[in-house]
Image (cartoon, rainbow, N blue to C red):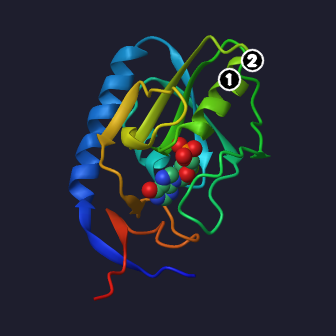
Amino acid sequence: MTKNYVFGDVMIGKEQIHKRIQELGAEISRDYKGQSILAICVLKGAVLFMSDLIREINVETKIDFMAVSSYGASTQSTGVVRILKDLDTNIEGENVIIVEDIIDSGLTLKYLKDYLLARNPKSLKICTLLDKPERRQAAVTADYIGFTIENKFIVGYGLDFNQLYRNLPYISYLEEEKHS
Ligand code: IMP
Ligand code: MG
């Protein structure tokens, strides 16, 4: 049986996202003052967040990208994490910040964190735009969180449903269509 989904309202608007990212950038810049960082974007969902965030950071910043398997055509996490694209950079001795779109079950980040820690970075922190703590299955917490949200299926500003809606400049959500 296929479910139909409809758009909810705008959950977090463009200006609100921008303002929060300025705050996160300022916080990261303070925390790493006089040091350099390597920001690792988790593709594809974090790409908009990453590009806006690094423009608000004023310490030496390098970037790299990783792609891991995510949901297929479903809205539920499978718990299976596969590396689809690995880093180009050697992270040994680097101050790594993983930049994610959302922490849901936490399974992806738990895996990524352990995977990257094994390569001996100087430090490793997590920066996520969104956090859905209600759905957590693996014990991971982010060091920098844009917005803590309730349990809804989010689309927009990088986040997709079946690869669509990543280009929306605001954050919205999908709801199951209600039949009367
Ligand atoms: P995890 O359940 O924390 O492992 O989340 C894995 C990935 O699923 C996230 O990095 C997102 O790319 C995606 N994801 C989780 N929740 C949502 C959502 O509400 N909308 C769109 N993608 C999501
Ligand atoms: Mg993702």
Q: Position of residue 166 (x, y in %)?
A: 48, 66
The residue lying at 54 percent from left, 23 percent from top is: 37
Q: Is residue 93 visible?
A: yes
Residue 112, located in which quarter of the rendered image? top right
Q: Is residue 74 left or right of residue 80?
A: left
Q: Indicate yes or no: mark 2 CB to ligand 1 under 8 Å.
A: no
* Residue occupying the point 28% across, 49% down: 18
Q: Nearer the viewer, residue 60 or 122?
A: 122
Instruction: Tell me, yes or no, if residue 47 can be seen here.
Output: no
* SS at mark 1 in the image: helix
Q: Position of residue 114 (x, y in %)?
A: 68, 23
Residue ID at (35%, 71%): 175
Badge 1: residue crowd in 10 Å (few <14, some 14–19, many ≥20): few
Q: Which mark is residue 80?
A: none
- Crowding at label 2, few (<14), some or many (≥20) Cα neighbours within 10 Å? few
Q: Which mark is residue 114?
A: 1
Quadrant that contains the C terminus: bottom left
Q: Residue at x 71, y 44 (%)?
A: 81
Disc on res. 118:
2
**Quick one: 107 or 14, which is closer to the camera?**
107
Secondary structure under the numbered disc 2 in the rendered image: loop
Query: Do tag 1 and tag 2 residues touch (Cβ < 8 Å)?
Result: yes
Query: Type of residue at label 1?
Result: Asp
C-alpha gap between disc 1 and disc 2: 6 Å
Answer with left or right where residue 72 lies relative to residue 30: right
Q: 149 or 159, which is in the foreground? A: 149
> Where 62 falls versus 71 (above or below)?
above
In the rendering, at what x and y percent does residue 17 appear?
A: 28, 50
